[in-house]
Amino acid sequence: MAATATMRNAGAALPAADQPMDPKRVVAFFAMVFGMFMSILDIQIVSASLAEIQAGLGAGADEIAWVQTSYLIAEVIMIPLSGVLARILSTRVLFALSAAGFTMASALAATATNIEQMIVYRAIQGFIGGGMIPSVFAAAFTIFPPSKRNVVSPIIGLVATLAPTIGPTIGGYISHAMSWHWLFLINVIPGILVTAVTWSLIDFDEPELSLFKKFDWWGLASMALFLGTLEYVLEEGNAKDWFNDEHILLGTIAMLIGAAVFFYRVFRVDFPVVDLKAFANRNFAFGSLFSFVMGVGLYGLTYLYPLYLGRIRGYDSLMIGETMFVSGAAMFLTAPVAGALSSRLDPRVMMMIGFGGFSAGTLLMTGMTADWDFYELLLPQILRGCSLMLCMVPINNIALGTLPPERIKNASGLFNLTRNLGGAVGLAIINTMLTQRSDEHYARLSEHITWSNPAALNWLNSVGGNYDSYGLDGASAAVKKLSGLVTQQSWLLSFIDVFMGLTLLFFSLIFLTLLIKRPAAAAPAGSGH
């Protein structure tokens, strides 16, 4: 029976290259893509404007970080869960409910009058919105024939990478032109449209409500504990000096307990909350590993560039957004090229070119000085944008393109989870490196600035004399200014160390690519092999 169905599907898939796509499905798919874009974009547009939200809500510096952390923790729990929910409820119900819930939570976030309300609304927004992301990847690889992958894969790759990249730009414009409330209100009208279109047009699958009886509630609770505390520890660890802080220590213990129960349940129950069997597929396992590292590069650089521009150059969120726009433009223009290449080039070659370009971009950044501006950052950002697209398209195809359709819903959640976890782990390592290396560089640089160093004395006398001429206390002003210069240089050197680390990481991936089997085009899978 299954064999007959497979042959029938194969027969439908083979001539699909010449058949026009069902317009209803195409419209539904693009509505889903837009919903995913809103969900991913929301993280970055808010992160660019946390200072405005903090002022508006009268929140403390340690509290405001939870506007992001609560969203990320909730989202990271929902992403792997969405595969099981899509099977039980159907893609149509899950996606439409996710879009509607995300829209309502966005509207609620705009009405928040204190930080506690905002944190709760953001957690709801992240949890419900997280259901949209894997559904799009699953739909792309189940409803379209393999012949359309070179069109569909660049679209989802572009959205997954473009949204985090242009987020700071859009967030900067919104918070400058209007109030911070519009960071959330901007989702309402598009959210209603996405909900209406997806509810009306999605017809990809049927619900299997009988599976609800077998749902593993203990598995869900342990996964939420495991992933939620993992995200918390990674987000907050550096700021709280890791295991010297009681909350981080308790979070780590809770994470280990959650992980132990979760993995026990996954391998013991009939219907696990997440099916890890997809990792038995070698290409999926390697694709997920590459996705994890792409998360490090994608979210790491989206964090590093604005941090450099704000801390060293003194840019505000709007100026940072305008400078960062280059990467987004490069991605947008490279997407069709990546799609065309994906049907002509061995995906491993595309990935090698992408990883090589990415490491070249970060290598250029190791020559940075405190004067680097838009034009110096232009080529590294172009290399980053183009390379991300050249990597993402083949990674998506390698990971999901050769799995059987019944595995794709679960696998899509796991695949997207690896990218998010890569971002969380990458940011934790980057922040820790920046803190530790800047302290070390500060200590090294300070050793050279002593009363026995004639150059330092001449500088202090010259600058101090200048302040004296304005009737100020020149000596103390000059020492303060010198300390600021040393701090700036120590930060700059720590940025260079991080960029060098990223260069080595991405360069090493070129060799790891050689371990992947060349994936058979998914057509043979459809032709009965």
Image (tube, helix red, strand yellow):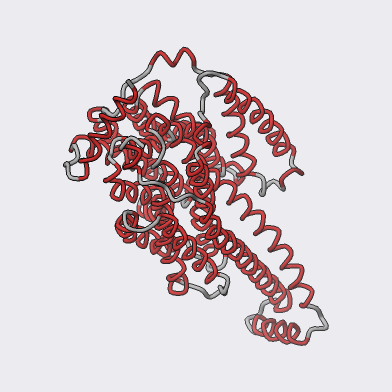
User: How many numbered callouts?
Assistant: 0
Q: Looking at the image, which residue is at 76% across and 77% down?
A: 449
The x and y percentages for residue 382 are 41, 66
The image quarter containing residue 232 is: top right
The x and y percentages for residue 165 are 42, 55
The x and y percentages for residue 319 are 43, 63
The image quarter containing residue 439 is: bottom right
Residue 423 visible to the viewer: no
Q: Residue furthest front?
A: 529
Residue 240 left/right relative to 313: right
Pick whichever, 507 or 57, lies toward us: 507
Residue 153 visible to the viewer: yes
Pick whichever, 135 or 521, lies toward us: 521
109 up-or-down from 510: above or below: above
Pick whichever, 201 or 182, lies toward us: 201
Pick whichever, 453 or 478, lies toward us: 453
Q: Looking at the image, which residue is at 76% across and 84% down?
A: 457
155 up-or-down from 454: above or below: above
Residue 407 left/right relative to 492: left
482 up-or-down from 294: above or below: below
The x and y percentages for residue 239 are 66, 48
Q: Residue furthest right?
A: 452
Q: Quadrant of the C terminus?
A: top left
Q: Looking at the image, which residue is at 80% across and 78% down?
A: 450
Q: Quadrant of the N terminus?
A: top left
